[in-house]
Image: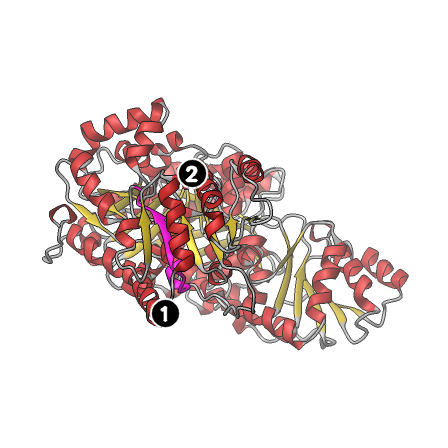
Amino acid sequence: MKIVHLLKHAVRGNGSVHLAVDLACAQAEAGHDVWFASARGDYDNVLASRGVHVTDLPEPDSKRHAIDNAVALAKLVRRVKPDVLHAHMMSSAVIALPVSLAFRAPLVTTMHNSFDAHSWLMRAGRRVVAVSEAERRLLRSRRYPDWQVVTVLNGTAGSAREGLPFDDIGALRRPSVTTLSGLHPRKAVDDVVEGFRRVAEEHPAWHLNILGWGPSQQDLERQVESAGLEDRVHFLGATVTPWPYLAESDVVVTASLADPCPLTVMEARVAGAAVVGTRVGGIPEVLGYGAAGHLVDTHAPGQLADAFRELMSGEGALGDWRERARRGSERFTVARMQRDYDDVYGQVLPRRRRGGSADESKEARRPRVAYVVPPSPVFAGIERVVHELASTLAREHGDEFDVHVAFASHYEEPELADVPYTKHELGVPRLMSLAGPLRRFVRRAEIDLLVVPQVEASTVAWVATRGARSVRLVPHLHGNPQVEEADGNVTTKLAFVAYRAWVARSVSAVLAVSPSLARYAAAHLSSRAPVHFAKNPVRDLRPTAHERTAGEPFTFVSVARLARQKGQDQLLRAFALAAPHLDGARLRLVGDGPMRDELRELAASLGLGETVEFVGYVSAPEDEIAASDCFVLASRWEGFGVALVEALQCGVPVLATDCDFGPADIITDPALGEVVPVDDVSALAAGLVRARQRQDTDADRSRRLEAAKEYLPSQAAASHAEILRGLLGSERDIERVSEM
């Protein structure tokens, strides 16, 4: 592929320039024919040494020079006949647009500085690359069309610039807090100085090293002098080889007020420094939303001081955060970025110029399987299941399947910051808005098999994939479609009508998370396609061991959303009815939801104020479960019942209602627990009494632990992989659940 990179200039100290240089060098090493066209180049030797053609263009700093630049660019394009023009600066994008149209060379732009007032000029590109998901959401909010904006996360590890001779600007004073940036107001280095001042007296051995230059330096020097920190704060100046300094630093901090995706934060993580950054732009994403570094608000020196205080408190905390920063930083490579840009270029090239037919490329690659996560406000049930399943599939079966997940919504969850599958964010607020973005995603990513949860979302996905004959659609049932249809609004009911009338005829298969749900789907939802029971993955919980003390009361625990579906109202009534026979047992309700106040009032009216505790939401409830004697699920309906398996993982016996669907599929042995009729208070009360009187044994506990292993992510992924092989053309015979 012939690629021409366009910049206004290529002077050192500019992040846009650094990224463009690294990308051009990586592309040349990957076998592309690459030109780098700019004025005032500081990296000509680096580029040439990696096989990049360096071309000088007049700097467009005036109207006359802009015309000269356009003429020179047109001559270059006429001679080179590039496949892609790639503009990294606004003036380059504007000048490149008419040249692109005249010579039919598609234009790609990278939005490096969305905070700039003139950044809208980057719309000139047929594709506008956002350098982080946060930037993509920002551009979408500015009415950039979904089809135009794609995300390519910056990369820095393996930079061609790392081969430059060491630029020695002096030694770091250690232990070191280091900030590396241009010294201008947007970088808010004054907040860093103030944060350091607040902890300087507590930690007299520490130093603040400031690397960079800019118009704010004199103001910063006066601030340091006023604070009496001249011997603790050091201005070292700018460097073109920051990596050795970052590797020596104990803590690296950026207090930027705006930063789409800072290379410095990535470089600090790769170097293994503990990192502190502000919650702006792409910084949270690069820091794993807090998993790989401390996040603070902008203009918050107090929060900076608190972060410094923790990191300066001892080698334990500092070492832990350094390890967190290093873990997962391997994805910040220039090579990964180069491959991602190749995919973007492929989207804008005419099919005849993509280097082979679509059929040939499809035969050469792994089949692409995409799981869809519809819009939702929280990362909970379906969202977590899809993440666990896709992660394990990618890790353990990645040689067979290229696994993708399309999230309609954005979630700032640390576990989503570094995933083994390919993550996409569609930025869709409502399910009914999903069809267009999903259609573009399927076409852009060339998906072979699309797995979509629930009937409503599957109907929308069917609409989105009409005409895309190569895509196989697979609904994935997690909940209870019988209840969803009966209690749903008009839109939901219409979705079910459409599903039965049209969607069910064209899907390749249906997945269901429990055998009983699979049987229902085969009888009521899938007239033609096979229905498969596909195990849900359940996290491998490792609860803290609980040592019981003498006289500790018997404890029932229920972990569920406080909602009508989960039946806590019936549980409270049953507990009140059984109380005289429970010998002072306690009930702990873990969770939150719309019925919280109503359930509290019910508990008080039943005289349970002393024996029932509302714990609230707990993100990791395994310790609550492990500390109990019996887990209770009083649901009116389920699709599977993940919480039951989590209880078995903790070795705790379970008591559940025999609702549709799932509990009876899980509790198949008296050693595991018991199921009682649904919506029957007396039966549930009797079950509570039997659970209280139960004589549990070590053998029972071992049986529960063994049963839970069947639902570990590896087991669930193996189940899904077997089904996927069949759907994608394997000769293996997959058993239909409907024939069980």
Locate residue 713, reporting x and y percent: 33, 61
- Which residue does the image show at 23% across and 45% down from the upper left? 516
Tell me the quarter of the picture where residue 510 sits.
top left
- Which residue does the image show at 65% across and 65% down from the upper left? 252
Badge 1 marks a residue whose secondary structure is loop
Locate residue 338, reporting x and y percent: 41, 58
Tell whether 179 sits left or right of 463: right
The residue segment tinted magenta is 647-659
Q: Earlier in the sequence, mark 2 or mark 1?
A: 2
Task: Tell me, for residue 192, which label it has, or none.
Answer: none
Residue tagged 1: 697
Tell whether 649 sits left or right of 169: left
Tell whether 320 sits left or right of 86: right
Residue tagged 2: 375
The reply to whether residue 739 is in sight is: yes
Depth check: give the residue in front, 622 or 343.
622
Locate residue 206, reporting x and y percent: 76, 73
Going by the numbered disc 2, the residue's amino acid type is Pro
